[in-house]
Image (tube, rainbow, N blue to C red):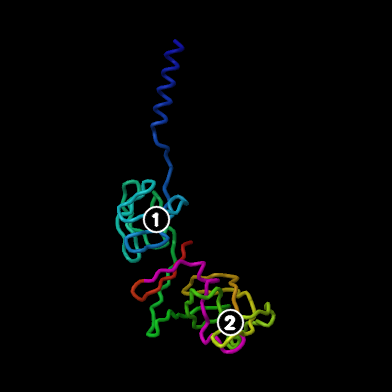
Amino acid sequence: MWMQQAAALAALGLLLAAVPATGASTSVEVEALLGETAVLLIDGERKTLRVGQSFADVTLVATQPMTATLEINGRAETVGLSQRVGTNFEKTQEQVVTIPRDAMMRYQTNATINGRSVLVMVDTGANMVAISSAQARTMAIDYSSGTPSQVETASGLSGAYAVTLQSVSVGGIQVDNVPAMVVEGAYPGTVLLGMSYLRHVKLQEHNGILSLSRSH
């Protein structure tokens, strides 16, 4: 009798093991799009897939300049750059700002720094946001209380002050407590939007349009 009960329990255990757990979900975020290749964050694991390749029930079906078509657990979904999607297909909110390239091949736009509107130029080669001391004074930035330093400019070494900006906002994408450098003199003529801000957003360039985006 006990052998029959043991067999029944064993069979029940096999049956339970064969039933997939309910409530499990796959989270996917599109981090970058490069031709027919996409960099995806799948359940926290970064994977680079080409069209037709799969990982963890996620297949990259197609890519477009700003979106990727994915098949997740047999269901197709088109997802934008930096968007996150799960098996329940509830997308996160996303802020996107587009900046067209000008005739001088620069990406310039208006930003709000410490509550004041100012023209900025996107510069991924600058480690920090850079502002001339002449412009800093017009923006009421008390840079003299910052940390003295030196930076190399086109005309040689210049005195500078490391400061922290209260906030930098581009098209509503706001970052608080942004490190910046105020350079003595009139250089740079336009505020340089460097990596101390840009590292908080995702960048995508296509056909002369630069997109800044952030999910929240």
Per the rendered image, the range of residues in magenta is 183-205
The circle on residue 156 is: none
Examine the image and state in which quarter residue 144 appears: bottom right
**Residue at 60% across, 89% down:** 185
Q: Left or right: where does residue 135 sit relative to residue 19?
A: right
Residues tagged 1 and 2 counted as in contact (Cβ below 8 A): no
- Badge 2: residue crowd in 10 Å (few <14, some 14–19, many ≥20): few
> Which badge, 1 or 2, comes first in the chain's sequence?
1
Q: Quadrant of the N terminus?
A: top left
User: For the residue marked with disc 2, what is the amino acid?
Assistant: Glu
Q: Residue 152, which numbered label? A: 2
Cα gap from disc 1 to disc 2, whole angstroms: 38 Å
Identify the element where label 2 is drawn: strand
Q: Residue furthest top?
A: 1
In the displayed structure, does residue 70 sit left or right of residue 179? left
Label 1 or label 2, whichever lies nearer to me, is 2
**Which quadrant of the figure has residue 14?**
top left
- The image's mark for residue 48 is 1
Q: Position of residue 61 (x, y in %)?
A: 30, 54
Q: Based on the picture, tell me whether residue 190 belongs to the magenta stretch.
A: yes
Residue drawn at 44 percent across, 15 percent down: 5
Disc 1 is placed on an element classified as: strand
- Estimate the x, y position of residue 69 in percent, counting from the top left: 32, 57
